[in-house]
Image (cartoon, helix red, strand yellow):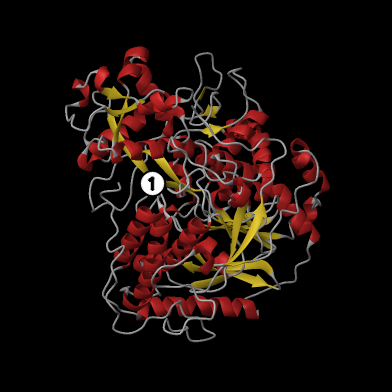
Amino acid sequence: MDDQQQPTTPAEEPAAAAEPAPAAEPTPAAEPTPAAEPAPDAVPTAGSVDADDLYVEGEPIHDTKAPRVPVDQMWDQRRFDATLVNPANRRKMSVIIVGTGLAGGSAAATLGEAGYQVKSFCYQDSPRRAHSIAAQGGINAAKNYRNDGDSVHRLFYDTVKGGDYRSRESNVYRLAQVSANIIDQCVAQGVPFAREYGGLLDTRSFGGVQVQRTFYARGQTGQQLLIGAYQALERQIAAGTVEMHTRHEMLELIVVDGKARGIVARDMVTGEIETHFADAVVLGTGGYGNVFYLSTNAMGCNVTASWRAHRKGAYFANPCYTQIHPTCIPVSGDYQSKLTLMSESLRNDGRIWVPKSGEDKRDPREIPEADRDYYLERRYPSFGNLVPRDVASRAAKQVCDEGRGVGPGGRGVYLDFADAIVRLGEKAVRAKYGNLFDMYAQITGEDPYQTPMRIYPAVHYTMGGLWVDYDLESSIPGLFVVGEANFSDHGANRLGASALMQGLADGYFVLPNTIANYLGTNSHQPVDASHPAAVEAVAAVRERIHKLLSIKGNRSVDSFHKELGNLMWEYCGMERTADGLRKAITRIGELREEFWSDVRVLGSGDELNQALEKAGRVADFFELAELMCVDALTRAESCGGHFRAESQTPEGEALRNDEEFAHVSAWEFTGVGTKPVLHKEPLEYEAIEMKQRSYK
């Protein structure tokens, strides 16, 4: 991917625009500040920039909701301390939930079942088309069915260690605690988990662990889990407790008296701008990996809902923490707009290798064992092919950088099932991985039963997201964030099979308890579309749409998105350097200005207009990308998926700096082109000793 996805002009000075562009999108209240007249705290947009020139450090931030008791007692204590809402009063309270993936869908179903008035929104034509459906390999839970030493504490430990000690201890322990309940819930819903011969639920291993705790439904686990949540959601829609709004995109958050009270959404079919109000708002809108243009995410995945909330005051935490998945089908050409993931579950039985010599161009089936380098097994004998994703991804990049990569451009490594087919038989391999093998064959035209798969790392998941406390409440009261959209559980690297676990834990078990405490302790006066905050939010959305449609420039939205993605992959991807991040920050600022002066968006806002949808999302990606690079530049250490070349061990492993960076970076928005404010949340570990990771 490195050689095929190159930045268009990463270090060149761009041609001057015919007319100066505004540094930010306009607002109805005032004309935008021209780029030639930056605000007093403006971020440098040309030449060399230093980390200290890019931000202002604000007051530290702390999670005040977690009880001051041992970590294994926190969740029980919090639930006991929380205010309850009796069933009769729930019918008087309303909640907006944006997103219908595992987190948002399960939350809407559960709150509807509890009796709240719920409005659910998704931009897809059906809730079951949420991107959670694409997850393949499995879901973790501390059931210890294998009697192999697993436990709640071990799942907790593995997750914190896998995140390179950059996640919040209290939230992760709770996740491990409720994990077993998730499996029971899903089995009761009819999710067809794989079973052993005797009828017991089957499990397998995923990266970063030495036990088998991952429950799965062949290679379709996300699909089956989402169908379970979708059925529960549809039951509540039929019962009248959930009001479903499909093909609606949230474009603004409405904040009244400092509290989240509603959203502005666009009907993507008619173009109508609508306001919706509630006593609380929940975002379950997924991650922002599509900022890289090429990723394993669905094309529609975006950051707009989270970013609109960020602009209204919600802190954005650890934006530079991006997960690169090691098991992706390599890029095949410049025409691609999406990449395809091959499940990490394949690493249970597949062996990863490259030729020992970069000159060896033989058919892989003709290369003898003596001429193969099973580099993960060699470097990490304890974990082998099941090292965490960040470790496996960097190792693949290293052997390819040495000239030993395979396939077009030398950007690939082999994932070989020959040994597994001999050991288990082809029939057993088909039973476990058949749909994944079929997908690979359809995309590449190669038969993975006969010749090794070719894989290479790609952008997959984002550990950063909106900052939340133990209750999953953001820095805006009444705004809750669940699933991948928040930052709290995965640190600097997510272990495989933990995304589905977090989404369902948040939606089924955590949010219903914590949002009840908020609703039960806050009074809410009625709000409607005539409220000044709502009028202002609608005006801002209309003005933004008008601006995008009126530019009538020469470049397509996709061309800007692709160039931005190239920059991000090159300079804020698998490996980052201070110089590269400075270049990226400078160029992103220039490219953002070019976008607002030269983008071409056809059609109108009063109809189905996918170009307009893309334009709004890419505009937000520009602002996010700049913050990601600033965050990466200020964090002068390597941890998990954030790998600074200047901070590594002699063996090339990530080298943390706990004295200076054992904190969450929570960023406050101050305006486009101005310095964001950094609030640090100290990370303190009491149940686990913080130490350098080793998977050898």
Residue 184's spot in the image, x, y percent? 63, 31
Looking at this view, name the residue that lies furthest to the front: 650
Is residue 108 visible in the rendered structure shown here? no
Are there few (<14), some (14-19), or many (20+) residues within 10 Å of tag 1?
many
- At a point 67% along the width and 38% down the height, the residue shown is 173
Height in image: 121 above or below 184?
below
- Quadrant location of residue 406? top left
In this figure, which residue is indicated by the disc labeled 1?
Answer: 296
Which x, y percent locates residue 154?
63, 29
Asked if 290 appears above or below 406 in the picture, the reply is: below
Q: Is residue 519 left or right of residue 610?
A: right
Identify residue type, mark 1: Thr
Q: Is residue 250 visible?
A: yes
**Observer-nearest residue: 491 or 576?**
576
Q: Along the horizontal axis of the image, is 28 left or right of 112?
A: left
Indicate left or right for 290 with 521 as reference: left
Q: Which residue sits at x=45%, y=22%?
A: 381
In the image, residue 606 sits, relative to residue 260, either above or below, namely below
Quadrant of the rendered image containing residue 621: bottom left
Residue 400 in percent (x, y) is at 29, 38
Residue visible at 53% across and 51% down?
100
Q: From the viewer's side, name the closer residue of 332 and 283.
A: 332
> Circle 1 — which element?
loop
Most foreground residue, 238 or 50? 50
Spot occupied by residue 653 in the image (x, y as percentages of width and height): 46, 38
